[in-house]
Image: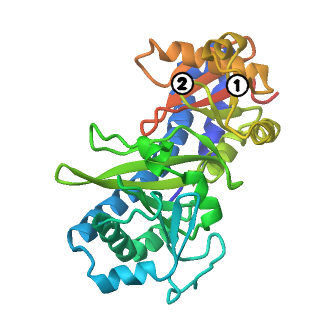
Amino acid sequence: MRPAMGLFTVCVLAVLLVAPPARAAETNPLARAVILEAAGRLDSQLAAVSGSARALGAAYAAVWRDTPAPPPEVRAKYLQSYAVKDGVVAFRDASGPCGTDPQAMAPCQALFFYNGENFTDETFRALAAMTRLAPAMAAAYDAMPFSWVYLTTPGQEFAIYPYLPLSRALDNYQPTQKGFYTAADFEKKACGWESPYLDLAGAGMMVTASCPVYDGDRLLGVASRDVTLAQLSKDVMADLAAIPGAQAILMNRRGKAIAASDPKVADCIVAENAKAGDAVVYFRADRGLAALGQEKNVDSPDDSLNDAAETVIERSETERKWPIVFSRAKDTVLAARLNTTGWYLVLVLPHKVAR
């Protein structure tokens, strides 16, 4: 159950009203508790997403081990109805629940092969195992309906739920070279996170958890889960914004803007990213933005938030104790680091919350 923020809000109000303004958050642990509790909630949600991907990968490994090379009649079933475009093969199942030409996001699995019609025994074994994985993919999506659930093999076989039409699957050409695949931590055999990005299908800012799947030392594939950042952060941001005069932002370690409690700032992030066709907005001051060295990066429209975020990034390089807390002329800044992704949640509180 999600903790109510009402009590935290009341506590912060009381703390900031009775404590000396310049040291309000530093002298009382309750303000620190707000930022740590909020970061903990985000961490829990992110951990659930990566846990779902990990479980899906384990299910695929079990199914793959129990799936022999398909006999000729099974191969014939895959080959009797498929489409090819620009080297991408989409397999169609006329007897499936969605028919041969489902709509995008229809409740069924889509299977693709990104190496033309160069089928091998391993291609059909992977396809057969992925077909058997379809109920687990549907269950994973139903439990956490955060956009796509998918699995990619080293041989370029690709299964995704819910349904993805071939026209949109072309964007994933050579999936083993895409960020959702390379984000997996192959060295440690652990889940990794892709940097926040703009969804080409129009879902807004997204992030992907990707977990490598092994049978012993053999890499079988990468299981991935997407989550839209609006879904992830909206409740936490709304609760922090309930503190009068407070502003909250979520950013990655380089300052890339993930979410903001101020609707105007949030809308600007969406507009700028949509215009650029990429995630280009950062909470960075001019000195930090210039250091990134990427021409199309832009700062957020709130200079005060950018300055606070820049200071957090600078202090994070040497800070050993979190949350980071510091005061400015009119407000106190608190920042917590998310354990799951290393992102920073930053809360700016006015010294005088009420007058």
| Label 2 SS | loop
Residue name at image x 49 percent, y 62 percent: 149
Residue 315 is situated, as x and y percent measured from the top left of the image, at: 52, 13
Could you tell me if residue 3 is visible in this image?
no
Instruction: Quickly name the residue at label 2.
Output: 28
Does residue 141 sit above or below 324 in this rendering?
below
**What's the amino acid at mark 1?**
Asn
**What's the amino acid at mark 2?**
Asn
Does residue 154 sit above or below 17 in this rendering?
below
Residue 316 is situated, as x and y percent measured from the top left of the image, at: 49, 17
Does residue 296 sit above or below 186 in this rendering?
above
- Label whose residue precedes the other's in the sequence (1 or 2): 2
The residue at the far front in this view is 118
Does residue 28 sit above or below 144 in this rendering?
above
Q: Quadrant of residue 126?
A: bottom left
Residue 352 is situated, as x and y percent measured from the top left of the image, at: 75, 23
Residue name at image x 44 percent, y 11 percent: 318
Label 2 environment density (alpha carbons within 10 Å; few <14, some 14–19, many ≥20):
some
Could you tell me if residue 335 is visible in this image?
yes
Instruction: Quickly name the residue at label 1.
Output: 297
Nearest the viewer among 195 and 75 is 75
The residue at the far bottom in this view is 95
Residue name at image x 41 percent, y 77 percent: 135
Discs 1, 2 touching: Cβ within 8 Å: no
| Label 1 SS | loop
Residue name at image x 33 percent, y 83 percent: 74
Structural distance between the alpha carbons of marks 1 and 2: 38 Å
Colour treatment of the image: rainbow
Residue 136 is situated, as x and y percent measured from the top left of the image, at: 39, 72
Nearest the viewer among 344 and 55 is 55
> Residue 231 shows which numbered tag?
none
